[in-house]
Image: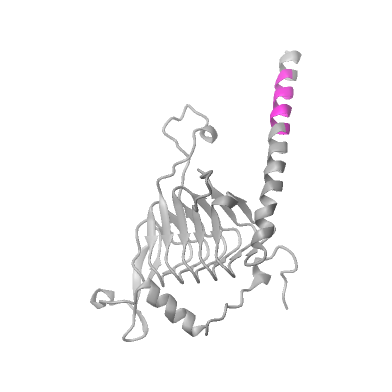
Amino acid sequence: MNKFKKLLINNAFTSLLTTRVFSILLHIHALYWRVKSYFFCHVAFSAKIIGWKNLKLGCNSVISGGTWINVNNRDSSGNIQVNIGKNVFIGRDNFFTVGKKITVGPYCLTATNCSFIGSSHIISDPFKFYMTTGVTNDWEIIVGANCFFGYGASVVGNVEIGHGCVIGAHCKVMNNIPPFSMVVGNPAVIIKRYDFEEKKWSKDFDSLKSWPSEDEYIRILEESLNGKYPFMPLSVSNDFFGDTV
């Protein structure tokens, strides 16, 4: 019995030692990509990126502390599976689990604890250890330009969210959302859409007919900025020296 316990301990130690060394080597290799990104965007020290080669970050974008971007089925050729546009602010403790692809358009803003679930563990056989069964890779999440996600909002599955949308706090989006929609609830429902004639959010959105295309919308946004990059609140995203008075 004592020999059996010793064997188990030795096997556990060997397993842990191997995975620890492997983890350190992977981290050292990823440092190149983190340093490279430093010159055009901001990735907080505590943000975890699994799949740097498959990630594209736009200029002046921010990934806040505690956020985890996990590319599950990484393409060894380096194809982009996470595309985050320019001037995007990803809030603290966000979670991205990537199946086929996740795209976040320019000028988007997410609050704390938002999640984008584009992949899930394969659970077809409960008699197998779920950690070893693999993950799905057929879902794609697309988020248009200048969308705002409130605290704890989540997007789950094969979903496209149009440009200019507002996703309410603790909202769960599982179906496509058209552009310039305001949604709340679990599951998410549209409560308003933006009326460009009245220049306000309207509950009578069935009578609304047209909205600018995403390209036209981005042009309007950039004109309002006079071609400049917006100031990003790094004090919110940082792990250290983030306090203000």
Say left or right for 2 vs 49.
right
The type of colouring in the image is: one colour
175 lies above or below 226: above
Residue lying at 55% horizontally and 49% vertically, measured from the top left: 70
In this rendered view, identify the residue nearer to me: 125 or 54. 54
Say left or right for 227 vs 166.
right
Residue 15 lies, in percent from the top left, at 69, 29
Residue closest to the far front: 77
Residue 77 lies, in percent from the top left, at 52, 46
In this rendered view, identify the residue nearer to me: 120 or 32. 32
Magenta residues (range): 7-17
User: Which image quarter: residue 214?
Assistant: bottom left
Residue 210 painted magenta: no
Residue lying at 41% horizontally and 70% vertically, measured from the top left: 165
Residue 243 lies, in percent from the top left, at 72, 71
Residue 13 painted magenta: yes
Residue lying at 49% horizontally and 33% vertically, measured from the top left: 133
225 lies above or below 78: below
Q: Can residue 52 be seen?
A: yes
| Quadrant in the picture for the N terminus | top right
Residue closest to the far left: 207
| Quadrant in the picture for the C terminus | bottom right
158 lies above or below 147: above
174 lies above or below 237: above
User: Which image quarter: residue 234?
Assistant: bottom right
Q: Main secondary structure of the magenta part?
A: helix
Say left or right for 166 vs 72.
left
Residue 21 lies, in percent from the top left, at 73, 37
Residue lying at 36% horizontally and 85% vertically, measured from the top left: 199
Total label count?
0
Q: Can residue 187 be seen?
A: no
